[in-house]
Image (cartoon, rainbow, N blue to C red):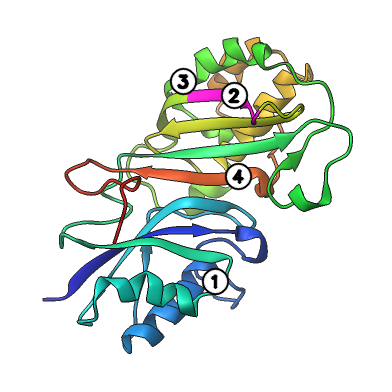
Amino acid sequence: MPRTIRLLIAYDGSGYHGWQRQRQGEPTIQQELETRLSALSQQPVTLHGAGRTDAGVHALGMVAHFHTSATMPLVAFSKGLNALLPPDIRILGAEEAPSHFHSRFSALGKTYRYDFFTGPVQLPGSRFYQAHCPGPFVPERLKPALAVLVGTHDFSSFERSGSRDKEATDGRGAVRSLNRISCVPVLARPGHWSIRFTGDGFLRQMVRILSGTLIEIGQGKRRAEEAAAILAARDRTAAGHTAPACGLFLENIHYSPQIFCPQAPCS
């Protein structure tokens, strides 16, 4: 019976056209991993990720699984695979999983982080890892909007235009539940901020559109009281701009502890 192997993966998405394999042949995280895994195990490998990330988006805790008849030890799928991968993709852990495990369908939720800088001049070394949104930013302005956005809603206004016709649906349309949203300064560095979102699922570019809208509110370009009307509109044009991909990090995929805990050490 084939083994099910799950991987905990971190990557710098700056040089890739997102997670998902592309027909046009552009470099993607999935394609790079599948190529190296197939060479390592000497058999074709199809990797199933917990979700997709867009071009330029990063991950600290992506989870993916694959099936294989290879008998090599687990360490080959972590240290061995890292020896073959480019340095902008790392395997943080590999673990045997039960046959019924699925990286996407077994997931209970995800946490994303959006990093941005509001100072006048951004350092060159950070341009691929945080958005530059110059201007005064007051996080207290976000509180009324966050109170509205947390909960179960139709987030059509925060979905990329046209995605609904292209993406497979699971019967709930654009309804998602956000369990927590927070905005905090980064290591007491003036002008550096992170917004975190934890929810049961996210629509295409939902986190980036939410982030763009909240940054506009924090900078006084939009009123926090508009959040309810934006949700009710179910219209992408009602929300703010789509924040740049470079500031977005997939931090964690959440599973039942009985299945897999991505924060736990993997051998």
| Amino acid at circle 3 | Val
Label 1, on which residue? 22
Percent of width and height locating residue 126? 75, 48
Q: Is residue 98 above or below residue 75?
A: above
- Nearest to N terminus: mark 3 or mark 1: 1
Q: Quadrant of residue 180?
A: top left
Q: Nearer the viewer, mark 3 or mark 1?
A: 3
Q: Is residue 103 above or below residue 38?
A: above
Q: In the drawing, what numbered circle is on residue 248?
A: 4
Label 2, on which residue? 183
Q: Are marks 4 and 1 in contact (CB under 8 Å)?
A: no
- SS label for mark 3: loop
**Label 2 crowding class (10 Å Cα cut-off): few <14, some 14-19, many 20+?**
some
Q: Is residue 186 magenta?
A: yes
Q: CA distance from mark 3 to mark 1?
A: 34 Å
- Nearest to N terminus: mark 2 or mark 4: 2
* Magenta span dominant secondary structure: strand
- Nearest to N terminus: mark 2 or mark 3: 3
| Amino acid at circle 1 | Gln
Q: Quadrant of residue 158?
A: top right
- Nearest to N terminus: mark 4 or mark 1: 1
- SS label for mark 1: loop
| Amino acid at circle 2 | Cys
